[in-house]
Amino acid sequence: AADNFQRLTLTGKHVLVTAGPTQEAIDPVRYITNHSSGKMGFSIAQAAVEAGARVTLVTGPVQQTTPDRVERINVTSAQEMLIACEAAMPCDILIAAAAVADFRPEIYTEHKLKKDTDTDDGLILRLIRNPDILATLAKRSDRPFCVGFAAETQNILHYAAGKLKSKNLDLIVANDVANTAIGFNSDENAISVIDRQHKQTHFAQTSKSKIAQQLIEFISKKL
Ligand code: CTP
Ligand code: CA
């Protein structure tokens, strides 16, 4: 019966999920990235599809199997992720679980960088800001219900509430990535969700798939 209820809650809705890290190329053989496994985003996509939604999952490079009935779009860089998300619009709900690289190398070098005499003292790599995918989509006139993730190592709820406001979100999921039991790459998570009214809801530590189901149920009630 509980399953049945869940299956019906997002029927007819299109859910767009971002997941995984992005990779920002330096040259043909090198890149900048982070430790995101994609597990949380993939679990959310699966929970949304089980709740009856049509799900588009835009993901950076990860080792995860695609949940049944989820449309998966693979991307590499943050810029590609933004383009893929814009192409997947409109959607009813956006859940931005990706750990998007905030910066990319200003210059992509077409050939492999060599250790020439200019670099005896080291190499300075200049980085520039990537677009903010979530904030960009939250500014559109066909803006969906927007859910962000705040990966923090300190002042978690304070920073998360700041992101909710600055990116104009409906919900922010605060995540303590300093705690290795629940952070990047782990199988479990514990989250606090903050809404526009500053109401906090805590979900205790459990598997990422259970957290994802609880989050999807919570979001469907807020719609
Ligand atoms: N995000 C995004 N595009 C970016 C950076 C972040 O869509 N270029 C999204 C993430 O997917 C997440 C939310 O914004 O849902 C918050 O990401 P986070 O890295 O915690 O916050 P930032 O705004 O990047 O701030 P900082 O890293 O400085 O804490
Ligand atoms: Ca960031």
Image (cartoon, rainbow, N blue to C red):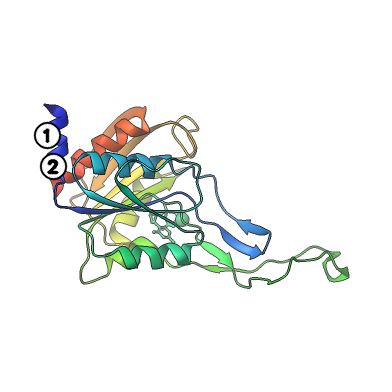
**Which residue sits at x=48%, y=40%?**
184
Quadrant location of residue 118? bottom right
Q: Which mark is residue 9?
A: 2
Quadrant location of residue 155? top left
Residue tagged 1: 5
Q: Secondary structure at mark 1?
A: helix
**Does the numbered disc 2 mark a residue whose Cβ is under 8 Å from ligand 1?**
no
| Picture quarter with the N terminus | top left
User: Label 1: few (<14), some or many (≥20) within 10 Å?
Assistant: few
Q: Amino acid at mark 2?
A: Thr
Quadrant location of residue 42? top left
The outermost residue toward the right is 117
User: Label 2: few (<14), some or many (≥20) within 10 Å?
Assistant: some
Point out residue 136 in the picture as x, y percentages from the top left corner: 34, 68
Point out residue 103 in the picture as x, y percentages from the top left corner: 54, 63
Q: Amino acid at mark 1?
A: Phe
Point out residue 41 in the picture as x, y percentages from the top left corner: 37, 45
Q: Is residue 160 left or right of residue 197?
A: right
The outermost residue toward the front is 69
Point out residue 81 in the picture as x, y percentages from the top left corner: 43, 62
Q: Is residue 58 above or below residue 127?
A: above
Q: Which mark is residue 178?
A: none
**Which residue sits at x=68%, y=59%?**
29
Q: Is residue 78 above or below residue 161?
A: below
Q: CA distance from mark 1 to mark 2?
A: 6 Å
Q: Is residue 70 above or below residue 94?
A: above
Q: Nearer the viewer, residue 118 or 152?
A: 118
**Residues marked 1 and 2 touching at CB (< 8 Å):** yes
